[in-house]
Image (spheres, rainbow, N blue to C red):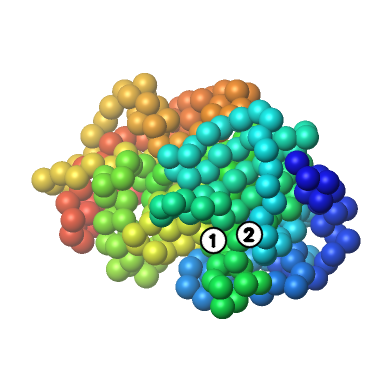
């Protein structure tokens, strides 16, 4: 690693020396403090999904201090040689490795020839670091995009801190606040999460927390459901958090029906849809434990549904 990168990769003091511009994100209670200087943050397109997750300086996170402090730089990317690979996800266009005691997260463009577009040099505990971004366009070489920076890097940070603090998990699911009650609809791609979200949108007393990625946490003696800024095909998100009351495992059907199943089967269905930290054995163990506790404590069953308004009427009839 170059001396320049090594110097800039240190903890939060390296961030606060160049305040420049600043914003604060809070996703499921995990606070992310972002600073940058000399660049221009673009606020069009998918940036709208982040608006509900922005907090003012006095409300950086639910715990009063940010969990992560990052400084963003747009321009030339540093060249960093891996010393030890932590997790190679090149099939998904990213990888995580360690060099000089730092954790380095690289993101590659999804289209051939897959150029490197982001290098994040982090403290070993992921609480601070520098994010280097390739310019989004040649016409604006110093501009950068929050959605582009946070996928998949932001997901990694969220998973890391949820599990590090033994708070919860990120789930591939639809999350709904229906008259104040949190409903979690878990399902693989194609199971009907976005379809059900569109049906729920017709009801004014329902908030769609997210139809692709939501967070479940254990706090204050119960389980809670929170949205994230990463939507699916429903393109709806919310920064709200509500008590989790029921868990459903989605499947399409010829009629609307609740299908009881064994706790072990439901646990397996849930575990398949967790975003797991394969790079940390202790965190992976916590995810296994958390999923078991969730299925044990919250009413859960399979849900077959049809693609019309009767699906929501059926769910309302279940109380």
Where is residue 1, by image quadrant? top right
Q: Nearer the viewer, residue 224 or 134?
A: 134
Classify 283 as above or below 319. Answer: above
Q: Position of residue 189 (x, y in %)?
A: 31, 45
Q: Which element type, helix, strand or loop, lies under badge 1?
A: helix
Look at 35% across and 31% down and name the residue there.
269
Is residue 248 depicted above or below 193 in this figure?
A: above
Q: Nearer the viewer, residue 257 or 16?
A: 16
- Callout count: 2
Residue 246 visible here: no
Label 1 crowd bin: few (<14), some (14–19), many (20+), radius 10 Å: some
Q: Is residue 153 above or below residue 18?
A: above
The picture places residue 274, in percent across and down from the top left corner, at 46, 36
Choose between 39 and 281: the one closer to the eye: 39
Q: Which residue is mark 1?
A: 148
Secondary structure of the residue carrying numbered label 2:
strand
Viewer-side label of 2, 1: 2
Which mark identifies residue 133?
Answer: 2
* Residue 212 pos. (x, y %): 40, 51
Label 2 neighbourhood size at 10 Å, few (<14), some (14-19), many (20+)? many
Residue displayed at 60% across by 23% down: 281
Vertical arrangement, residue 249 with respect to residue 284, above or below: below
Specify which label sits upstream in the sequence, 2 or 1.
2
Contact (Cβ within 8 Å) of mark 2 with mark 1: yes
């Amino acid at each position: 690693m170059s001396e320049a990168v090594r110097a800039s990769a240190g903890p939060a003091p390296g961030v606060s020396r160049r305040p420049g511009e600043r914003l604060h994100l809070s996703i499921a209670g995990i606070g992310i403090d972002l600073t940058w200087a000399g660049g221009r943050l673009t606020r069009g397109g998918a940036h709208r999904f982040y608006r509900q997750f922005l907090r003012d300086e006095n409300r950086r996170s639910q715990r009063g201090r940010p969990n992560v402090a990052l400084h963003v730089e747009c321009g030339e990317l540093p060249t960093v040689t891996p010393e030890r690979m932590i997790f190679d996800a090149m099939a998904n266009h990213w990888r995580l490795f360690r060099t000089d005691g730092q954790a380095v997260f690289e993101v590659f463009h999804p289209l051939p020839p897959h150029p490197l577009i982001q290098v994040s040099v982090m403290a070993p505990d992921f609480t601070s670091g520098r994010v280097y971004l390739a310019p989004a366009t040649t016409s604006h070489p110093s501009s950068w995009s929050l959605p582009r920076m946070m996928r998949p890097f932001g997901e990694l940070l969220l998973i890391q801190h949820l599990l590090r603090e033994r708070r919860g998990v990120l789930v591939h699911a639809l999350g709904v606040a229906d008259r104040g009650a949190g409903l979690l609809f878990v399902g693989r791609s194609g199971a009907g999460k976005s379809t059900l979200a569109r049906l729920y949108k017709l009801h004014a007393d329902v908030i769609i927390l997210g139809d692709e990625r939501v967070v479940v946490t254990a706090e204050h003696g119960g389980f809670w459901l929170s949205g994230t800024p990463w939507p699916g095909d429903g393109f709806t998100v919310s920064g709200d958090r509500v008590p989790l009351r029921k868990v459903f495992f989605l499947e399409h059907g010829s009629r609307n029906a609740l299908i009881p199943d064994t706790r072990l089967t439901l646990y397996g269905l849930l575990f398949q849809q967790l975003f797991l930290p394969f790079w940390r054995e202790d965190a992976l163990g916590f995810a296994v434990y958390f999923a078991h506790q969730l299925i044990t404590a919250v009413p859960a069953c399979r849900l077959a549904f049809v693609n019309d308004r009767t699906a929501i009427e059926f769910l309302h009839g279940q109380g």
